[in-house]
Amino acid sequence: SPDGERSLPVEDLFSGYYETVLAKNELIASVHVPAQRSRHAAYTKVTTGSADDWPALGIAVVIEASGEAVKSARIVASAATEKATRLKAAEAILSDHRIDETLLRRAADEAVGEAEFVADVRGSVPYKRELMRVYVRRALQAAWAETGRSDGHA
């Protein structure tokens, strides 16, 4: 902006549906994505119309493993929520634990409990809750499989 540059984490950029914290005289000049090194990611989306339709739910997951356990995890939900939302309580459940079906269910249930859903033409709040319960597990399984460890199935 005319006032100079500023940096902020991407999770602080969005303030609502199609809204950002940018002032009218600001623009994004660059985006820095750090090297992922030992992190592995997966993204899943659910569309209720065609494959190129706006999703009813989007889930992005990044996992870093340490031995057979999760060292750190990031889970972000979009489309079913007012804005892209990091699900920190669900992330915390995964830290320092081995991925298995019980842990996946706990993380998915926690994600559903902490997300603030919005109903729209792509689905009701109960429908989107169930989508999240299923797709958080699938995204975690896919990211975990990328680490070269077990496939997340007990």
Image: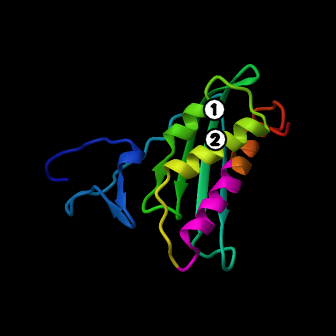
* Residue 27 pos. (x, y %): 29, 57
Q: Which mark is residue 142?
A: none
Residue 133 magenta-highlighted:
yes
Classify mark 2: residues with Cα within 10 Å, few (<14), some (14-19) or many (20+).
many
Q: Is residue 47 left or right of residue 5?
A: right
Q: Residue at x 50, y 76 (%)?
A: 120
- Which corner quadrant holds the C terminus? top right
* Residue nearer the viewer, 143 or 6: 143
Tag 2's secondary structure?
A: helix
Tag 1's secondary structure?
A: helix
Q: Hey, which quadrant is residue 68 in on the image?
A: top right
Compared with residue 29, is residue 40 higher up or lower down, i.e. above or below?
above
Display coloring: rainbow
* Residue nearer the viewer, 148 or 3: 148
The first of marks 1 and 2 along the sequence is 1
Q: Are marks 1 and 2 in contact (CB under 8 Å)?
A: yes
As shown in the figure, which amino acid type bears the numbered disc 1? Leu
Q: Which residues are magenta?
A: 121-136
Q: Which mark is residue 94?
A: 1
Q: Is residue 146 left or right of residue 85?
A: right
